[in-house]
Image: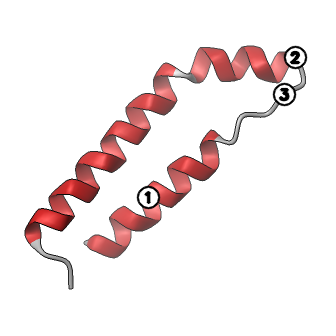
Amino acid sequence: MATPFARLVTAVQYQITLAFALVLLPVATLASRLGVTLPLHRLIERSEAAYESAR
């Protein structure tokens, strides 16, 4: 079981990851139009998995 501090750090990290992805959304959209895929979904999925396991 995770400590309260570890849960807090994981929750903050998850929120920062979501904010980072939202900030990069215009860049990801432009890259997609150019045929390049950014792997932001993997970053979000990993952060979400860590957040859920710490709960």
Measuring from the top left, give residue 48's x and y in whole percent. 44, 58
Asked whether disc 2 touches disc 1, contact meaning CB atoms under 8 Å apart, the reply is no
Amino acid at pointer 2: Leu
The quarter of the image holding the N terminus is bottom left
Amino acid at pointer 3: Val
Is disc 2 placed on a helix, strand or loop?
loop
Task: Say which quarter of the image contains residue 19.
Answer: top left
Task: Say which quarter of the image contains residue 40.
Answer: top right
Is disc 3 placed on a helix, strand or loop?
loop
Task: Say which quarter of the image contains residue 38.
Answer: top right
Q: Which residue is mark 3?
A: 36
First-in-chain label (2 vs 1): 2
Q: Is residue 37 left or right of residue 27?
A: right
Asked whether disc 3 touches disc 1, contact meaning CB atoms under 8 Å apart, the reply is no
Which residue corresponds to the image point at 87% horizontal and 16% vertical from the top-left?
34
Q: Is residue 53 left or right of residue 5?
A: right
Asked whether disc 2 touches disc 3, contact meaning CB atoms under 8 Å apart, the reply is yes
Measuring from the top left, give residue 14's x and y in whole percent. 35, 49
First-in-chain label (3 vs 1): 3
**In the picture shown, does residue 52 fall above or below 12?**
below
Q: Residue 48 bears which disc, if any?
A: 1
Measuring from the top left, give residue 15's x and y in whole percent. 32, 42
Q: Which residue is mark 2?
A: 34
Q: Is residue 36 left or right of residue 42?
A: right
Which residue corresponds to the image point at 34% horizontal and 63% vertical from the top-left?
51
Instruction: Assess disc 3: are there few (<14), some (14-19) or many (≥20) residues with their C-alpha within 10 Å of its C-alpha.
Output: few
Which residue corresponds to the image point at 51% horizontal and 59% vertical from the top-left?
46
Which residue corresponds to the image point at 74% horizontal and 14% vertical from the top-left?
30
Amino acid at pointer 1: Glu
Gap in Å between the C-alphas at discs 2 and 1? 28 Å
